[in-house]
Amino acid sequence: MILIDQIAAQRGDRPLFSNLSFALQAGDCIHLRGENGIGKTSLLKMLAGLSQPDQGQILWQGQALTELGDDYHGQLHYLGHKDALKDLLSPYQNLHWATQIAGNPLSEAAILHTLAKVGLLQQCDLPVRSLSQGQKKRAALARLLATPRPLWLLDEPFVALDTTAQSELGEWINNHCQQGGIVILTSHQQLPSIQHVTELTLTRPL
Amino acid sequence: MSSWAFFCTVIRRDLFLAWQQRGDLLVGLVFFVLVACLFPLAIGPEAKLLSRIGPGVLWVAAILANLLALPRLFQADWQDGTLEQLLLAPAPAGMMVAGKIVAHWLTTGVPLTLIAPLLGVQYGLSSDLLLMLMATLFIGTPVLSALGSIGAALTLGVRQGDMLLALLVLPLYAPVLIFGSGAVAAVAGGLNGYAELSLLAAIACGSLFLAPWLAAMAIKLAVE
């Protein structure tokens, strides 16, 4: 479903990776590894369509991302380094506006149901700035569960989560893959029980 | 999602966020009032001189107040990562910027326009001058927000970005200032000032049409 065709990227004059090719089918989960600064986040941003590779192309369902344009964004969830939460707003308000922007407004009950899934029902009206790092991460993860989309791009999703939350996230990833979704994630940690995960280690070009 | 629905959603979101931080809006407005009040104090109660410089002073004060509020356009969204999510919405990025410009104008330009006649009174401006001042501010402040959005997008993540933003944007504001205060001066001189007002409206149409797309390109570079 998603095909990465000989892409190359550089940051300034420094090459990050080149001739990178791989393909993912429905139900696949890939774990990107590699040392700091190797370009994992850059690769995820390219897969999200936030930046373009210097060479090569990325195809979604056989169509190049450059041709798909904004419609492609409706196919994916991107969870970046930053949580994309407004400090002043509550998890409820954050999720409300996130789903509005994503073009999939949810009812009050649906938002509360999603927040219950990530274990934030009690904190749903507190401002995000008063939450712990792990709770903020949960509030950000709620976006994944709120709107069903086939492609999940997760940049260090396990950081700051406690062990229960980590295994819950592993569970969600498993469910997503079983339903035919695709997950691409980066992590420096040992992954909790995720089935059928393929590891891909990025290396510096010679 | 249609572009129009996305545009409206971004406006509603930014207005909601602005309301949550309404103190920030007040700062810009109080700044405008203070700058406009300092000039009569410095120059003295000379009615003829005051009514002559009044429109220009109010226009410059409005531009500075707008400049003060410009970093708010994208900076907070960029810092917490919501700007990435806005770019990843299934709609054109230009519409997102256009929505932000409109929300920015509603929260800065419109309050400035509404309060300007009160300040005009202390310069002894007559009622037809006050009316023209409001008209020029009403048409001119959207241009400030639109042109400012390009500067705000270009200086995202730049060290001392706010200073650079002022240097980038102030020269672009010059035509707006010239035609804005020119229209009021024309009325004071016994003309109707429609020529300057029409030119100001033309600048508004052009900049509101082009600025969102230019700013969107700059934002994509900042997020990369």
Image: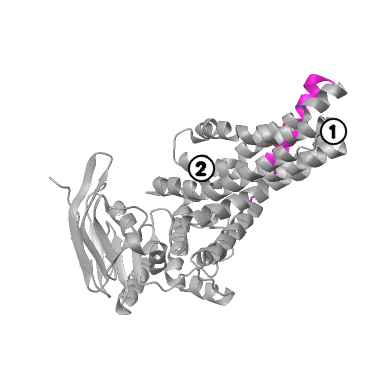
Residue for point 50% across, 71% down: A104
Residue, disc 2: B150
Outermost residue on the bottom side: it is A179
Position of A204 with respect to B117 (left or right) is left
Quadrant position of residue A201:
bottom left
Residue B112 visible? The answer is no
CA separation in Å, label 2 and label 1: 34 Å
Type of residue at label 1? Leu
Horizontal and vertical percent position of residue B125:
84, 33
Q: Main secondary structure of the magenta part?
A: helix
Which amino acid, by three-letter code, is at mark 2?
Ile
Q: Residue at the location (38% across, 56% down)?
A: A80
Which span is picked out in magenta? B21-44
Q: Return the residue nearer the eye: A2 or B81.
A: A2
Question: Residue B132: where, in percent of width, then height?
Answer: 78, 40
Identify the mark nearer the N-term, 2 or 1: 1
- Image position of A17 with respect to A28: above or below: above
Residue B37: image location, x then y, percent? 78, 30
Judging from the image, what secondary structure is the residue with disc 2 in?
helix
* Residue A101 appears in the picture as rendered: yes
- Determine the image quadrant of residue B157: top left
Mark linked to residue B125: 1
